[in-house]
Amino acid sequence: MSRKKIIAGNWKMNMTPTEAVELVNTLKPLVANDEVDVIFCVPAIDIIPAMEAAKGSNINIGAENMYYEDKGAYTGEISPAMLKDAGVKYVVIGHSERREYFAESDETVNKKVLKAFEYGITPIVCCGESLTQREQGITLDWIRQQIKIAFLNVTADQAKEAVIAYEPIWAIGTGKVATTEQAQEVCSAIRVCIGEIYDEATAAAIRIQYGGSVSAASAPELFAQPDIDGGLVGGASLKPEFGSIVNYNK
Ligand code: PEP
């Protein structure tokens, strides 16, 4: 089955609304590539101005997080209805920085994934092991556990639309990219796990990204792996280099 590649930028807590517009305008011509879904996941306050700036281009503006309740007394949170109303189609869920600094757990990730689907927003579900876990040889067990909990009560039809981002924590923002073999091994194990939870068709349909210090130099080999359907890109998504990553196949 041929899956369309999906390459998403994760801006993290960078870019004021003014800077966001400038960056979208700079990257717009550089990320044109019809063969790839291109997503810029941006801070909540940047979503609307970035969308305005991206109009008429192939850039989809996504969110970096959302809460799992519909609305109410949750000061500072952003709801799925707010994202949907703004026209957001993708949201990053369970990034390791959210897990580390904001106490997100596999259970809250699952609640957010279910809520995103309820609102027709595609979750980019993050998973990944620490360096200690890799050294202990428990990477695959850990990732399988994260995936099983994240997808609890998610239907096969929903899972087919989901995106999973495999991001080894030791590779995020460190300049230490996983080898293609390491990345492919885990992405393949994730696909097998999805096949066990659901069926072959769901495993074949779901898109799995690699994330962790992806650069213009590493992207072509990573994205050529059979189970890697694109990337979630942090640092390099803020630079013109992102254009070369999106056009890894040119
Ligand atoms: C990320 O933020 O998801 C990420 C992978 O960051 P970086 O590309 O900077 O390692």
Image (spheres, helix red, strand yellow):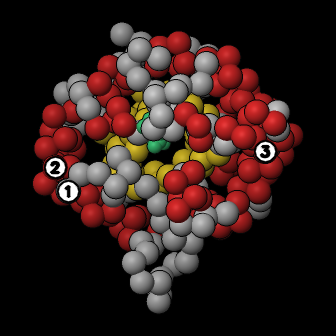
Q: Earlier in the sequence, mark 3 or mark 1?
A: 1
Q: Is residue 10 visible?
A: yes
Near-viewer residue (29 or 242):
242
User: Is ligand 1 less than 8 Å from the beta carbon at label 3?
Assistant: no
1 vs 24, left or right, is right
| SS under mark 2 | helix
Q: Which mark is residue 222?
A: none
Number of dots carrying numbers? 3
Image marks 2 and 1: residues in contact by CB distance under 8 Å: yes
User: Is ligand 1 less than 8 Å from the beta carbon at label 2?
Assistant: no
Residue located beneath label 3 in the image: 142
Residue located beneath label 1 in the image: 16
Tell me residue 211's x, y (percent): 53, 34
| SS under mark 3 | helix
**What crowding class fits label 1: few (fewer than 14 Cα within 10 Å), some (14-19), or many (20 or more)?**
few
Residue visible at 39% across and 78% down?
Answer: 76
| SS under mark 1 | loop
> What is the spatial separation of the Cα atoms under label 2 and label 1, in whole angstroms?
5 Å
Residue located beneath label 2 in the image: 19
Tell me residue 129's x, y (percent): 69, 42
Q: Is residue 222 above or below residue 99?
A: above
Q: Quadrant of the C terminus?
A: top left
Near-viewer residue (57 or 219):
219
Q: Is residue 123 visible?
A: no
Q: Is residue 245 above or below residue 107?
A: above
**What crowding class fits label 3: few (fewer than 14 Cα within 10 Å), some (14-19), or many (20 or more)?**
some
Tell me residue 165's x, y (percent): 58, 40
134 vs 161, left or right, is right
Residue 63, by quadrant, is bottom left
> What is the spatial separation of the Cα atoms under label 3 and label 1, in whole angstroms?
36 Å
